[in-house]
Amino acid sequence: MKFISTSGKAEPVSFMEAMRQGLAPDGGLYMPDRMPKMDDQFFKKPVHRSFAEIALEMAKPYLGDELKEEALGSVAEDAFNFPLELREIEPGFHVLELFHGPTLAFKDFGARFMARLFAEDANSRGEKVTILVATSGDTGSAVAGGFYDVPGVEVVVLFPKGKVSPLQQKQMTTLGKNITAIEIDGVFDDCQRLVKQAFSDKELAKKMRLSSANSINIARLLPQSFYYGWAANRIGSANKTSFITPSGNFGNLTGGLIAKEMGVPLERIVAATNSNDVVPRFLGGEEFRPGPSVQTISNAMDVGDPSNFVRMMHLFEGDADRLRREIPGYSYTDEETRRAIREVYQSIGYTLCPHTAVGYLAAKRDAQIRGGRTERVILGTAHPVKFREVVEHETGEKIPVPDRLKKVLEKEGVFREMRSDFEEFRHFLIQG
């Protein structure tokens, strides 16, 4: 299989080359040149398959030409060595808990899978690669943890000053070795801009091999389709299933669209955001108008110019009307999010992180508007402890801190401070 740029001006490449490049030379994002279809019976059989088994089968159409099945299976087994849970919190409403990995966020899935692919690539090519990643919160900690001490890979994480939680910052800044964290005096969009400028700089390309670990990288995006398949398999084909996806850069939602194209039996995907609502406004009929991001308590979704929107349009062949018909979108304020955390805990004793709370509100709204006998799966994107200041305030209860996080909190973070200036960033990359 080949991968093409959403901008349509770059040569098709293999999966591994698309992963190495991160961003296509023409500035577009890589997508498969065709969407493979899984065997119709794979998800319909009443068999509870392991996550690694589903991941392997869903990855083979993309990577089968480049990695032997045994090697790809080993990548999946090693990357996904932690549990995920599907918890029904109310009749017909489930939370797919994706936060039981090493950094307690759904981004562990993509980061760990990609890190192991890069390790395979580094072993075979003997080349050093520098991974650049912009983060509004959980991506940085997941990538830092996933790539920590991987041979042949250096990681540079850019995070916005004062706009990530204390725990998220600790997870990014306490590892050392091949992980360098940089605090940018700006917002997430500034961090993302610096990364994109680095990829388009021809002089940098001559001096070093750069790649990305944001969801602009196809290797980070693809694993985000796997858990849609796992959850649909758990619920069973006898029920219609809709997924409600808290979204910032919209990689998680695009992963769901890919899963649907591959044949995962899901009825629809609902976009849920905070006050950074450029996509829900577009889905409601407005023009797509990116703007500066707004800081919220669900900071991993604080994105004003979602990169993966171009992939969404690519999957719908540029048909905005069809995209609007198939994907509803809802947005919520911090006040509404806080109220949801408080009321859900008081009524059923379940603790939501701010991002999952946004998803819960969207699920309830979707059920109210559309009705139907549909099982709704809300993607639980982060452990509540990562946002304990907010969550504990609303629930009135202390959240136990897992031992692995206690160790992180005891360490001193080390990071560089930098303006949101590309020349300064470029100089750092070249000089170190």
Image (cartoon, grey):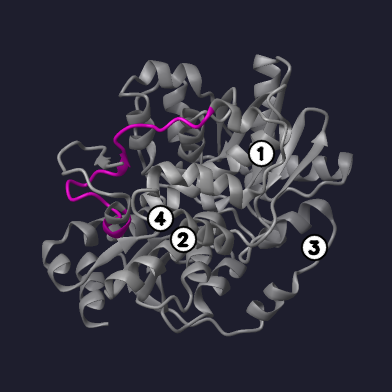
Residue identifier under label 2: 71
Q: In front: 234, or 422?
A: 234
Q: Which residue is mark 1?
A: 231
Q: Is residue 46 above or below residue 70?
A: above
Residue beneath disc 4: 214
Among the two numbered marks 3 and 2 on one chain, the one whose residue lies closer to the N terminus: 2
Is residue 1 toward the left or the right of residue 356 in the image? left
Left-right relation of 385 to 156: right
Can residue 248 be seen in this snapshot? no
- Amino acid found under the numbered disc labelled 4: Asn
The residue that appears at 44% across and 47% down in the rendered structure is: 221
Sequence order check, earlier mark of 2 and 1: 2
245 vs 305, left or right, is: right
Q: Nearer the viewer, residue 93 or 241?
A: 241
Location of residue 77 by image quarter: bottom right
Tag 2 near tag 1, CB within 8 Å: no
**SS under mark 1:** helix
Kindly report the distance in space between the C-alpha atoms of the residues bearing marks 4 and 2: 24 Å
> Is 283 inside the magenta-drawn segment?
no
Res. 168 visible in picture: yes
